[in-house]
């Protein structure tokens, strides 16, 4: 399999770009933000809104897709949207002069705008980069890229969390802690800027059959039964995931007392397992199909919130950082969630041609994003209405305001996930290759000569 040298250069840059972005994202969209909001005095409902913001922002990808229907401008859209999105975080020092409640909503506003603009760039990025990767090795390449980026992102977050935990232990969540978080965000923006420069240097492949079109073409793929099944199944799963997403971080911090460093170890276990498993899952998808991989991923993720439901608040921490049940949750999540997401992305890529891919991805992102934010807000509202720390039994299980949404989310993951059995694998357009050929091609692409 021969890949042109400019494409090899671009795909190597994509691994570097994704790794730098992952460090930035682990700080501005991770557990550190929960600590920041707690320091600002946020309540359970506001923390649920924080968890929902990335999903809410995905709705704006539809507008980017409509723009791309009128012109082949994928790279400029990515560069402009990512540049503005990442630069907005430089506004955060304003919270130092704002009162508590105003500061909470100011940060929520900055995050909402930043995530929304980023969502527009993500639509264009998927269409742009997927065109560069040969179909026969697409699963393996994206699996390796995501795993490498994930591990480096967690490593960056681990260093940041150690610094933040040390400052919190010495000074509490006062002004010094707030300044430390803002410094960490500024460092994250530096990584984001370096990632943006890598995007700038990557090549772009022009669309082969670009035709200007209107809003109606965004829904073309949904007129196909399989396109609808992919979108509706993923949308249902994201609604269920949103209910658990609303309380997961709060449960770890408030109920189990897991420090930021423990959260970093959770992420390290997640991405460490992912790094080992994703190359194999990528090749599994290339050989047996993304539908089969999606089924495997769903079977591995729907039950995971129950590990938290059955974890007592006083369970001893393994290695002084995590209860063993939460460590199992991290390992299972690292094994199956990336597999599920990889299968979903590859099904979208295979379902739509290059010129319609941005539209399908945008519609999928918008619908699943709306579903996740509805689920997240519902989970947060349920927890808020039950009351902070209120406990009650249900079918013999001791539940409280945070455990009940986890139980409900588990049941909905099981129900909505049954739709994966209705999805059909889109036909391949390129000849399949053996596992040895695929690994050799990706190895040469990432580390070998570009000829």
Image: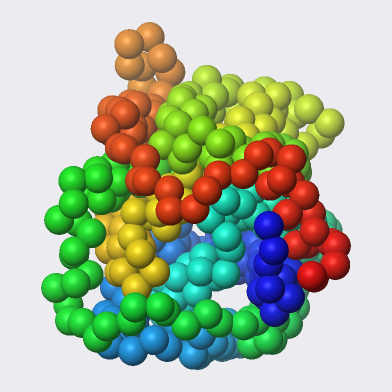
Residue 397 percent coordinates (x, y): 41, 14
Give whichever of 443, 328 is nearer the camera: 443
Left or right relative to 232: residue 190: right
In the rendered image, which quarter is residue 92 located in?
bottom right
Q: Residue at x 61, y 30 (%)?
A: 332
- Quarter containing the C terminus: bottom right
Q: Residue at x 18, y 52 (%)?
A: 224
Residue 414 percent coordinates (x, y): 34, 26
Left or right relative to 275: residue 401: left
The answer to whether residue 368 is visible is: yes
Above or below for 192 versus 248: below
Residue 139 percent coordinates (x, y): 57, 49
Q: Residue at x 15, y 56 (%)?
A: 223
Above or below for 374 versus 417: below
Residue 271 percent coordinates (x, y): 70, 45
**Which residue of the protein is positioned furthest toward the top in this rendering?**
396
- Quarter containing the N terminus: bottom right
Above or below for 297 versus 215: above
Q: Residue at x 79, y 54 (%)?
A: 443
In the rendered image, which quarter is residue 366 located in?
bottom left
Give whichever of 35, 240 is nearer the camera: 240
The answer to whether residue 89 is visible is: no
Above or below for 412 versus 275: above
């Amino acid at each position: 399999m021969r890949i042109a040298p400019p494409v090899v250069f671009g795909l190597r840059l994509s691994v570097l770009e994704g790794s730098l972005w992952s460090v930035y994202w682990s700080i501005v969209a991770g557990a550190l933000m929960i600590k920041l909001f707690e320091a600002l005095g946020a309540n359970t409902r506001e923390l649920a809104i924080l968890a929902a913001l990335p999903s809410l922002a995905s709705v704006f990808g539809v507008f980017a897709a409509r723009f791309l229907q009128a012109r082949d401008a994928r790279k400029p859209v990515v560069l402009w949207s990512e540049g503005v999105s990442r630069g907005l975080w430089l506004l955060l020092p304003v919270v130092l002069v704002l009162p508590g409640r105003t500061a909470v909503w100011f940060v929520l506003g900055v995050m909402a705008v930043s995530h929304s603009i980023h969502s527009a760039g993500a639509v264009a990025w998927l269409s742009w980069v997927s065109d560069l990767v040969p179909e026969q090795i697409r699963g393996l390449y994206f699996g390796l890229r995501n795993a490498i980026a994930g591990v480096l992102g967690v490593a960056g977050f681990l260093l940041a969390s150690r610094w933040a935990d040390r400052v919190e232990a010495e000074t509490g969540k006062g002004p010094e802690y707030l300044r430390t978080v803002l410094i960490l965000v500024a460092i994250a923006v530096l990584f984001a800027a370096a990632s943006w420069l890598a995007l700038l240097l990557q090549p772009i492949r022009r669309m082969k059959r670009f035709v200007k079109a209107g809003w109606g073409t965004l829904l073309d793929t949904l007129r196909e039964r399989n396109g609808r099944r992919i979108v509706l199944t993923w949308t249902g799963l994201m609604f269920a995931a949103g209910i658990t997403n609303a309380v997961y971080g709060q449960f770890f911090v408030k109920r189990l007392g897991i420090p930021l460093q423990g959260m970093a170890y959770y992420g390290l276990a997640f991405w460490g397992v992912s790094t080992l498993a994703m190359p194999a899952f990528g090749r599994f998808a290339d050989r047996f199909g993304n539908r089969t991989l999606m089924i495997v991923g769903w079977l591995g993720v729907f039950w995971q919130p129950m590990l938290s439901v059955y974890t007592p608040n006083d369970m001893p921490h393994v290695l002084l950082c995590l209860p063993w049940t939460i460590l199992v949750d991290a390992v299972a999540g690292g094994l199956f969630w990336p597999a599920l997401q990889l299968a979903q992305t590859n099904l979208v890529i295979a379902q739509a041609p290059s010129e319609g891919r941005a539209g399908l991805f945008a519609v999928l992102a918008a619908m699943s994003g709306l579903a996740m934010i509805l689920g997240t807000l519902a989970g947060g509202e349920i927890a808020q209405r039950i009351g902070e720390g209120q406990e009650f039994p249900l079918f013999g299980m001791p539940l409280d305001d945070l455990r009940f949404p986890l139980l409900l989310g588990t049941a909905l993951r099981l129900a909505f996930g049954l739709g994966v059995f209705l999805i059909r694998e889109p036909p391949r357009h390129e000849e399949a290759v053996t596992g040895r050929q695929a690994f050799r091609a990706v190895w040469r692409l990432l580390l070998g000569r570009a000829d």
